[in-house]
Image: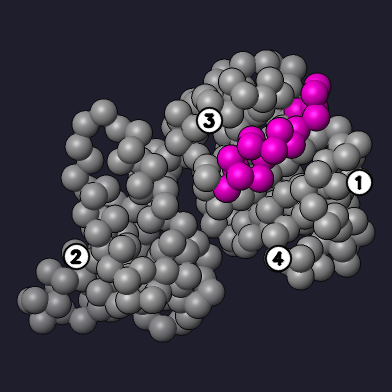
Amino acid sequence: MKIAFLGLGRMGTELALKLVDDHELTVWNRTAEKTEPLVERGASAAATPAEAVDGAELVITSLFGPDTVREVVIEPGLIPEGVSWADATTVSPADAAAFAEAVPGYVHTPVVGSLPPAREGKLGVYVGGADASRRRTVSTVVAPWAAANPSRLKEVDTAAGAATGKLLANLALAVTIEGFKEALLLGQSQGLSEEQVVDMLGSTGLEFIVNMKKPFLLGERSVAPGDFTADAIAKDARLMLASAETDLPAVAAALASLEAQQEAGRGDEDFSTVVVNR
């Protein structure tokens, strides 16, 4: 299939690399140098989004939030009539519904997971849209993102439903990293070392986030560049708070911790900076 892929940040690059061997890929990114890994694998680079989508059978976007989607896609009317648009950007349910209203070919395809599972084909993927035929086509194309665990690719019947699934997944990350931080603070207050707290959190509800982020905490990995930035999950936490019809105090606490890292100039570091620099 002839595919235009727009947005080659950390995750976008990994998603595009999973498709480049099987499709005719034209790629675009605001920072042109980021197209080079795809061009080296056989993709073509476009100078503008309009050039990228010219003649495409499918457009895939992986951009930094709904405002960027509006700027790059919606406002210029980028998607050609009749062409499907698979959007992997994390957006709110309201944003997804609005994009689906504006572009009949819209299929929301947010992914769940960070860079290591992306490289291994172990992401979760939600494929959401009202048109079952378009969903099936997009699901087939993006299947390599979840190839190592196909059950993690789930079709839902609305774009908003897919967006909700992604926010729920990232809510779990946000509130558990806050829980990990507070567990470390409690343990520290009682004279425990970081290693002791990590060991005691095994087989608890925080085990997943502890196992994911302890290499950063214990100095085995650097938070720069990391896998998933504090900037990115803070943006998602704001979408959660804006989308809920009631208070989300745990998300609000997590966002406060993330914003403290942003204010300290660590927004582009892995969000484990919340526990590393608590």
Is disc 4 placed on a helix, strand or loop? Answer: loop
The C terminus lies in which quarter of the figure?
bottom left
Stretch in magenta:
68-84
Q: Residue at x 75, y 28 (%)?
A: 84
Residue corresponding to mark 2: 183
Q: Residue at x 74, y 17 (%)?
A: 133
Residue 31, position as x, y percentages in the image: 70, 65
Instruction: Please tell me how crowded label 4 is: few (under 14), some (14-19), or many (20+) other residues with Cα within 10 Å.
Output: few
Q: Earlier in the sequence, mark 3 or mark 1?
A: 1
The residues tagged by marks 1 and 2 sit, at their Cα atoms, a distance apart of: 49 Å
Q: Is residue 73 magenta?
A: yes
Q: Is residue 74 left or right of residue 141?
A: left
The residues tagged by marks 3 and 2 sit, at their Cα atoms, a distance apart of: 36 Å
Residue corresponding to mark 4: 31
Q: Earlier in the sequence, mark 1 or mark 2?
A: 1
The residues tagged by marks 3 and 1 sit, at their Cα atoms, a distance apart of: 27 Å
Q: Are marks 4 and 2 in contact (CB under 8 Å)?
A: no
The residues tagged by marks 4 and 1 sit, at their Cα atoms, a distance apart of: 21 Å
Instruction: Please tell me how crowded label 1 is: few (under 14), some (14-19), or many (20+) other residues with Cα within 10 Å.
Output: some
Q: Is residue 39 magenta?
A: no
- Looking at the rendered structure, the kind of residue marked 4 is Thr
Q: Earlier in the sequence, mark 3 or mark 4?
A: 4
- Looking at the rendered structure, the kind of residue marked 1 is Glu
Q: In the rendered structure, find residue 96 and report the number of the disc placed on it.
A: 3
Q: Quadrant of residue 245?
A: top left
Instruction: Please tell me how crowded label 2 is: few (under 14), some (14-19), or many (20+) other residues with Cα within 10 Å.
Output: some
Which of these two is toward me, 173 or 160? 160
Q: Earlier in the sequence, mark 4 or mark 2?
A: 4
Q: In the rendered structure, find residue 24 and report the number of the disc placed on it.
A: 1
Instruction: Please tell me how crowded label 3 is: few (under 14), some (14-19), or many (20+) other residues with Cα within 10 Å.
Output: many
